[in-house]
Image (cartoon, rainbow, N blue to C red):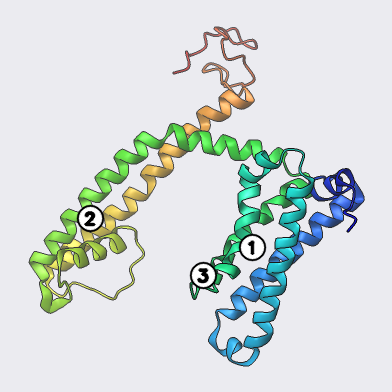
Amino acid sequence: MHWPDKDVLYTVIFGTETPAGRRFDIALIVTILLSILVLFLDSMGSVRAHYGGLLYGLEWGFTLLFTLEYGLRVYCAQNRAAYAKSFYGVIDLLAALPTYLAIFVPGASFLMVIRLLRVLRIFRVLKLMRYVNEANLLLRSLNQSRRKIIVFFSTLFILVTLFGSLLYVVEGPENGFTSIPTSIYWAIVTITTVGFGDITPQTALGRGIAAVTMLMGYAIIAVPTGIITAELGREMRREYNLRHCPQCDRSGHDGDARYCKYCGGAMEEER
């Protein structure tokens, strides 16, 4: 059997600069989306009852295509071990495994939703890699905020435990608060302003506590937003050199500037 030239395959499968490579990646993304659509339809009982056989056949067809594609990627990769261990290499492998796994573990085929991660290749196809820098900026902001966010969630956990325990004592099992974990669930739903309404306090004192919990929920929402926004502002100043002069409020100063290059005023030291 004559295998295709590895260099040609590599250019088509891994590259997006050539028309063939671009068409391959676009066809791959369309195939991935169609396989996910089949998965969604298969999860609907009424559709599966009428078209179960067709969906099963399509599922295996997509799986064989992804298996062949993964094999070709390994075959033509310049560094096979590096590709196999890379993010996309692991995702490419996991995209094909669930259908085989479902032979031994019923229901495992729904893990195929992981194929959606392969759509990230669209960043390369449409030359959107410059947006990755923006994503990195946001990730750095979240990383810088992690300690404050941990403290915030720790405080939030204490609050929902406190309010949940209070409602358990005040309302009791007869009003739906059958246990402290159930009451904490109510507190989480209430303080996050979701409000499913499946458990509601019936006594005047319980409703008073619920009102305080809801009002506190609105105040709490602003806390993580403020934390992340502040860190995002700092990262943007570092990334885009947006340091402002406190005198004239004009930006564009160097990070180590001591005086404004527009008005000559003293610059505030960055913390």
Counting labels gives 3
Residues tagged 3 and 2 counted as in contact (Cβ below 8 A): no
Q: Where is residue 173? Give x, y as percent.
A: 12, 75
Residue type at tag 3: Ala
Depth check, mark 1 against mark 2: the one in front is: 1
Q: CA distance from mark 1 to mark 2?
A: 42 Å
Viewer-proximal residue, 187 or 72? 72
Tell me the crowding category of disc 2: few under 14, some 14 to 19, or many 20 or more residues within 10 angstroms, Cα based.
many
Residue type at tag 2: Val
Q: Earlier in the sequence, mark 1 or mark 2?
A: 1
Q: Where is residue 72? Give x, y as percent.
A: 77, 54
Tell me the crowding category of disc 3: few under 14, some 14 to 19, or many 20 or more residues within 10 angstroms, Cα based.
some
Asked which secondary structure carries label 2, the reply is helix
Residue beneath the point at 54% across and 68% down: 101
Left or right, 197 with respect to 94, comes to: left
Q: Where is residue 126? Give x, y as percent.
A: 79, 49
The answer to whether 88 is drawn above or below residue 246 in the figure is below
Q: Earlier in the sequence, mark 3 or mark 2?
A: 3
Residue of label 1: 96
State the mark number for residue 108: 3
